Amino acid sequence: MKKRWIRVGAVLLGCAVAILGIGLLQRLLMPKYMHGIVEGAMIAEYYEEEKNHDVVFIGDCELYENISPAVLWEEYGIHSYIRGSAQQLIWQSYYLMEETLRYEKPDVIVFNVLAMKYNEPQKEEYNRMTLDGMRWSSSKVGSVKASMTEDESFVEYVFPLLRYHSRWNDLNKDDFTYFFKRDKVTHNGYYMRVDVKPAVNVPAGRPLADYSFGENAYLYLDKMVTLCKEHDVELVLVKAPSLYPAWYDEWEVQMEEYAKEHGLKYYNFLETIEEIGLDFNEDTYDAGLHLNLSGAEKLSVYFGNILAKDCGLENRRGDAKLEAVWTEKLAAYEAEIKEQYEKINNVKETPEE
């Protein structure tokens, strides 16, 4: 009997060692997203935050590069977070919203409507940057199933090692430096850029055969509306003031009608560029596709006033716990601003060979 238990113990120990080894190998081979393409690290950062936000922004780069939660706090005492990722599709936004409402109940959730242009799954690379960072839950399961392209399989999301096993030749210093930890790449979800590339010769949108948003896109927008009503959270729709890609008049009509029909607030910031004070010679880092720091701060001041007045959000400055949290966050925010400007200045001062 004793020998039998020894054999059982040895087998169990062997299994545990094998599972641990597979887990460590998987951790090594999965992309770290700490430099270069950092968007894949954004979704996971949310889980380390205190879950008592007034506003949660959910959507694509038109939110995480155009809104600064630091400014919303400094100007209005609004505590906010952006759950953003590159080319975040509307069903991914819905399941992130569903997951977020399990952790907290903000007063307002803001969704950027550019994602309505996509009615079907797009690219695995972008799927991974949203889905790999989510913790496992029924929301992640739903998002994976809704997002997979024909060439993807669910099991590769459950066991990412099956997807990334060929990264051996691509391993670099980051894979070992960030094996157990990650640095933050955002400020409450905001991805900062301080460089400037003016918007010149912005391309006009190509004519479309059909300007109607797809049935699947509307399905998930309906689900967002229902979910927010069930949780007594106000859903606010926005269109960021990005000059490109094109936002067609026909799309605008559909969003205005949808918002009116469902009693939602909808703000198209393309229509208020002058009021916001945006100058696309100075306030974009990539010729009008996204705002840089100065542009994002201007939009945040403008939108923060709307959130405070139209949505009734209270100024939470004076909350000792939040004041302490934001003292630390603002210090990190200012430090990165300084660091980014120093890098730009160093590049300018380096003589050409």
Image (cartoon, grey):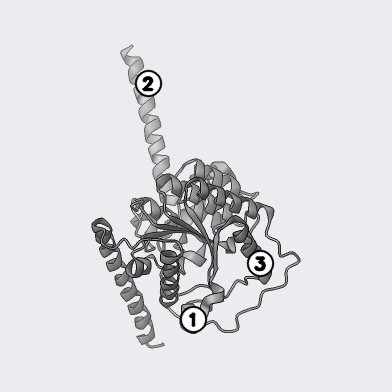
Query: Closer to the camera, 134 or 174?
Result: 134
Residue found at x 41% / y 61%: 312
Q: Label 3 sits on what residue type?
A: Val
Q: Label 1 sits on what residue type?
A: Lys
> Is 77 drawn above or below residue 7 in the view shown?
below
> Is 17 drawn above or below residue 63 in the view shown?
above
Task: Look at the numbered disc 3 and give the secondary structure of its residue.
Answer: helix
Q: Which-is-in-front pick, marks 2 and 3?
A: 3
Extreme-right residue of the structure: 209
Q: Quadrant of the N terminus?
A: top left
Mark 1–mark 2 Cα distance, whole angstroms, equals 65 Å
For residue 351, say whether it is visible. Answer: yes
Q: Which residue is mark 1?
A: 197
Of mark 1 and mark 2, the one earlier in the sequence is 2
Query: Left or right: where does residue 193 sit relative to residue 89?
Result: left
Label number found at residue 282: none
Q: Label 2 sits on what residue type?
A: Val
Mark 3–mark 1 Cα distance, whole angstroms, equals 31 Å
> Is 143 drawn above or below residue 320 in the view shown?
above
Label number found at residue 253: 3
Q: Position of residue 270 (x, y in %)?
A: 56, 74
Q: Position of residue 118 (x, y in %)?
A: 63, 59
Question: Is mark 1 in CB contact (under 8 Å) with mark 2?
Answer: no
Of mark 2 and mark 3, the one earlier in the sequence is 2
Label number found at residue 8: 2
Query: Is the residue marked by circle 3 packed among few (<14), some (14-19), or many (20+) residues within 10 Å?
Result: few
Residue found at x 33% / y 63%: 315
Task: Look at the numbered disc 1 and give the secondary structure of its residue.
Answer: loop
